[in-house]
Image (cartoon, rainbow, N blue to C red):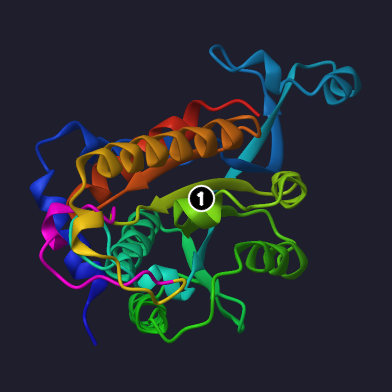
C-alpha cells in the first residue's frame, strides 16, 4: 500500500522555504478559523484580562470582579467528502489522472489535520453507494482510507452524484465539522443550493476542484482520446483546432469563475487544482482565505 502521507511530506519539503509552508507553523489557529471553548471556572480579575470575559452576575454576588476561564478544545473534526464517480478517473491537464490528484489532495488535508492533532475521516461515493470512515488521528487508519479512496476511482465506476453524497453527509453527521469537498468543476456546477445552505447551517465547507484535461491538451494531441460520457472517439483534427482550443479554454475559465462566485455567496472558499505539483500551494492559499471569510 503506497504511503500517501509520506508522498505529501516529500512534496511539502519542496515548499519549505516558501510562504505557503507558514500555514503549518505558528499557533494552532493558523489553519482553521476559530476555536471552540469550554467553560472551566472563575477567578478574580487581573490586570491585562479581557473585559469581555468578566462574569457580571458572579461579580455582583462576590463583590469582586470575576473572570470566566475557558479550556480550549484543540481537536477539530475534519471530514473529507470525496467524489469517486468515473469522471474522477479521467485525465487532468498535467497528464496525471484526476484520481491521482484527488487522492493527493485528500492526503494534504489529512497531513495538515494530523500536524494539528485534529481528527480526520472521509466519506466518498457516487450513484452506486457511499463509503464512510469515521474521524480518527491514527496514521495507519488514515493511510488505509486514502488507499481505499484512490482505488475506488476507475473508468468502470458509477457516474458521479455529488448531491446524493452531500445529502448523505447532512443526514449522517450531527457534530460540527470542517467539510473538504473534493470533486471536479462539472460536478461542482450541479451542486444544489439548498443542500449547500443546509450544510452551512452546521458546518464549515471548502471545495477542492480537480480540473479536467482539455480535449486540445498538447500532452495528448497525438494519442487516441475517447469522451468519457459517450465513449466516442474524438478526431485528431478536432482536438488540434486552435479556435476550438480557445473556445474551450474560455468556457472552462468562465465555469470556474461562476462556481467560485456561487460558493462565495455562501461564504465558502474554493481552489482549483490541475496537478499534484500545484496542489499544496493552492490548498494552503484556500486555507488562509478560509480564516478571513465572513459568513
Name the residue nearer the viewer: 267 or 3: 267
Q: Does the stretch in magenta take in 135?
A: no
Answer with left or right where residue 110 lies relative to residue 241.
Answer: right
Q: Quadrant of residue 105?
A: bottom left
Dominant SS type (magenta) = loop
At numbered mark 1, what does the secondary structure look like: helix, strand or loop? loop
The segment highlighted magenta reads 214-228
Residue at the location (53% across, 13% down)?
Answer: 48
Residue 229 location in percent, x, y?
Answer: 46, 71
Answer with left or right where residue 218 lies relative to residue 132.
Answer: left
Q: Does the stretch in magenta take in 224?
A: yes
Residue to which mark 1 is pinned: 74
Vertical placement of residue 66 versus 24, above or below: above
Q: How many marks?
A: 1
Q: Quadrant of residue 174?
A: bottom right
- Residue 84 appears in view: yes
Q: Quadrant of residue 232?
A: bottom left
Residue at the location (29% across, 62% down)?
Answer: 101
Residue at the location (30% across, 36% down)?
Answer: 26
Residue at the location (38% across, 82% down)?
Answer: 154
Name the residue nearer the viewer: 112 or 66: 112
Answer with left or right where residue 54 lies relative to residue 137.
Answer: right
Classify the position of the N terminus by image quarter. Answer: bottom left
Residue 141 location in percent, x, y?
Answer: 40, 81
Amino acid at each position: 500500500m503506497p504511503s500517501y502521507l509520506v508522498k505529501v511530506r516529500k512534496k511539502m519539503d519542496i515548499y519549505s522555504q516558501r510562504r505557503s509552508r507558514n500555514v503549518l507553523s505558528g499557533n494552532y489557529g493558523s489553519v482553521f478559523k476559530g476555536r471552540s471553548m469550554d467553560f472551566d471556572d472563575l477567578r478574580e480579575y487581573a490586570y491585562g484580562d479581557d473585559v469581555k470575559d468578566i462574569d457580571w452576575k458572579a461579580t455582583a454576588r462576590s463583590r469582586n470582579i470575576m473572570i470566566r476561564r475557558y479550556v480550549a478544545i484543540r481537536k477539530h473534526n475534519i471530514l473529507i467528502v470525496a467524489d469517486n464517480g468515473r469522471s474522477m478517473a479521467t485525465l487532468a491537464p498535467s497528464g496525471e489522472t484526476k484520481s491521482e490528484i484527488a487522492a493527493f489532495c485528500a492526503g494534504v488535508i489529512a497531513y495538515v489535520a494530523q500536524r494539528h492533532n485534529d481528527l480526520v475521516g472521509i466519506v466518498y461515493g457516487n450513484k452506486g453507494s457511499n463509503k464512510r470512515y469515521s474521524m480518527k488521528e491514527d496514521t495507519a487508519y488514515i493511510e488505509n482510507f486514502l488507499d481505499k479512496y484512490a482505488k475506488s476511482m476507475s473508468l468502470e465506476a458509477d457516474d458521479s452524484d455529488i448531491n446524493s453524497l452531500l445529502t448523505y453527509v447532512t443526514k449522517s453527521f450531527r457534530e460540527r465539522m470542517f467539510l473538504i469537498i473534493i470533486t471536479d468543476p462539472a460536478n461542482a456546477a450541479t451542486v444544489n443550493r439548498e443542500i449547500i445552505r443546509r450544510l452551512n447551517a452546521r458546518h464549515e465547507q471548502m471545495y477542492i476542484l480537480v480540473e479536467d484535461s482539455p480535449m486540445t491538451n498538447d500532452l495528448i494531441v497525438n494519442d487516441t482520446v475517447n469522451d468519457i460520457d459517450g465513449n466516442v472517439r474524438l478526431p485528431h483534427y478536432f482536438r488540434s483546432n486552435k479556435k476550438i482550443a480557445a473556445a474551450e479554454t474560455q468556457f472552462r475559465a468562465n465555469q470556474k469563475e461562476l462556481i467560485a462566485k456561487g460558493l462565495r455567496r455562501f461564504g465558502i472558499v474554493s481552489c482549483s487544482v490541475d496537478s499534484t505539483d500545484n496542489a499544496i500551494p493552492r490548498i494552503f492559499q484556500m486555507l488562509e482565505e478560509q480564516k478571513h471569510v465572513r459568513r
